[in-house]
Image: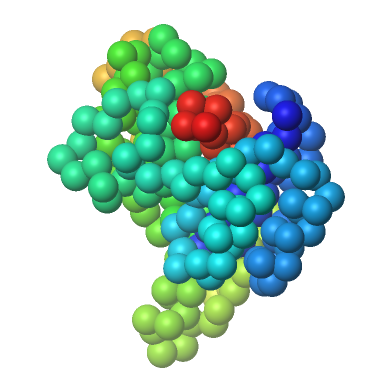
Amino acid sequence: MITLCFDFGNTRSKAAVFENSTLIHTIDLGDELLLSIERCISEYRPHFSILCSVTDHDVRVEDLLQSKTKYHKLTHQSKLNFSIQVSKAETVGPDRLALLAAARSQFPHQNTLVVAAGSCITYNFINTFGAFLGGAISPGMNMRFKAMHTETAKLPLVKQEWNPPLTGYDTASNIRSGVEWGIVHEIDGFIEKYAEKYNSFNAVLTGGHSSYFAGQLKNRIFADPNFIFKGLYILSELNN
């Protein structure tokens, strides 16, 4: 059985192909979503599909998936393998729901913090009883670069650079040091605070920038850039 899992994020739209429970391929869908999805369906002939979207996507995408597959759109009303213990469940993004589903499946008896480093950085905490208690959201790396450029008169717009200097030697390297090392210390700080409070604790790092930061953290962390897709497959099985 083939399942297509779609993740429409703020920066990129991606898909993963599962054969039974094995992830066999990931796809960057590009800008022409409808055409890309038509190609995916034609090539893989999926039985099931699931969509996680945090954007205002073309409604024809869902019509296509509904007509060609057994389709599920992930929302807070979907069947979940964990409980939501926050005040307004409807405000929890579907991307966070998928991450929590993967955490609950892979680490069922642990307190787990899932850190997703993408357009924003989300911190998502699920306890040993399978309850999502909330977390935190902060600006992602590119958002921080853009904010310093647009909210000041003269700071330039710079891009990420591997291994930025700790001590910047010009304006651009000062900005890179502040943004990139700032995020490293932010993530480490959250992990340490949770570890102090909870026993049997572990942390997961995922998202588009996960590989960039994984090697910089001083805390032990499980890094998996495809964590959201694993959660989406689990929830597709549960809801289809």
Q: Toward the viewer: 19 or 203?
A: 19
Residue reaching furthest to the bottom: 153
Residue reaching furthest to the left: 87
Q: Position of residue 75 (x, y in %)?
A: 38, 45
Q: Is residue 14 left or right of residue 175?
A: right
Q: How is the image coloured?
A: rainbow
Q: Position of residue 203 (x, y in %)?
A: 47, 26
Q: State which quarter of the image contains the N terminus.
A: top right
Residue drawn at the location 54% of the way across and 58% of the way down = 62
Q: Toward the viewer: 177 or 190?
A: 190
Residue reaching furthest to the front: 67
Question: Does residue 183 appear in this view?
Answer: no
Place residue 232 in its image quadrant: top right
In this rendering, the count of numbered labels is 0
Residue drawn at the location 55% of the way across and 44% of the way down = 71
Residue drawn at the location 46% of the way across and 64% of the way down = 55
Q: Toward the viewer: 114 or 72?
A: 72
Place residue 79 in its image quadrant: top left
Q: Position of residue 27 (x, y in %)?
A: 74, 51
Q: Position of residue 131 (x, y in %)?
A: 29, 23
Residue drawn at the location 47% of the way across and 80% of the way down = 149
Q: In the rendered view, would you say 81 is above or below 42?
A: above
Q: Is residue 95 left or right of residue 88?
A: right
Question: Does residue 52 appear in this view?
Answer: yes
